[in-house]
Amino acid sequence: MRIVNTEITFTNEEYCRATYYGSVRHKESLDRKNQHGVDPSYSLDIHIKGVLAEMAFCKGIEQPYPFTVNTFHEPDVYGYHIRGTAYPKNPELTVRNSDKIPDAIFIGVSMDLKGFDYTKRLFKIYGWTTAEEAKNLSEFYTDHGNKRPKAWFIPQSHLNPMDTLPELL
């Protein structure tokens, strides 16, 4: 699978699908212990954004989105872990202590969610790393003062470019 597009937009119908699957994930997560210190009042929003990031990557490789639920610690889509951020100006890819497989590949997707016209919101696929590479960058291990467990927040400048992404399937 080659990355074809790194800048993605969605139709209103695609946003509706993401909202539905995000809400299904949210419902399923309510029965689980929160492992990343997320305030439950933000959980629905986080699940919807996660689905949007995964959908953006699938559009970028021109493959259908599998709409998965309950795949904890397994790759999100096509063998890759997708991590979204709503901070498009200074995106950071998050790798957590619970990400145990050293050669697991994590892909960063930033999302600009401003404005009411969903079809003009831009998603960018901005880089990738492995868990092992990320965890060797100790200067990026922090909690950012957000009262959640520490993680590695790898800036785009320290990620591998998308044209070097290994094909997994």
Image: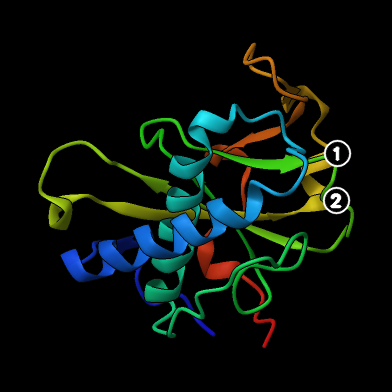
Residue 11's place in the image compared with 136, above or below, is below
Q: Quadrant of the C terminus?
A: bottom right
Locate residue 115: give its quadrant: top left
Q: Evaluate whether residue 48 shows in this view.
A: yes
Separation of marks 1 and 2 at Cα, in angstroms: 6 Å
Q: Residues within 10 Å of mark 2 (few under 14, many from 20)?
A: some
Q: Residue at x 49, y 64 (%)?
A: 54
Residue type, label 1: Asn
Q: Quadrant of the N terminus?
A: bottom right
Secondary structure at badge 2 equals: helix
**Residues marked 1 and 2 touching at CB (< 8 Å):** yes
Q: Residue at x 75, y 48 (%)?
A: 32
Q: Which residue occupies the foreground of this view, 107 or 22?
A: 22
- Left or right placement of residue 143 versus residue 16 in this view: right
Q: Looking at the image, how many numbered discs can be counted on the residues?
A: 2
Locate residue 86: give its quadrant: top left
Q: Which mark is residue 17?
A: none
Task: Residue 111: give x, y in percent of width and height.
Answer: 36, 46
Residue type, label 2: Glu
- Left or right placement of residue 155 versus residue 131 in this view: left
Which residue is denoted by mark 2 in the rendering?
132
Q: Which residue occupies the foreground of this view, 109 or 39?
A: 39
Task: Residue 29: give x, y in percent of width and height.
Answer: 65, 50
Q: Which mark is residue 136?
A: 1
- Left or right placement of residue 39 versus residue 143 in this view: left
Residue 114's place in the image compared with 118, above or below, is above
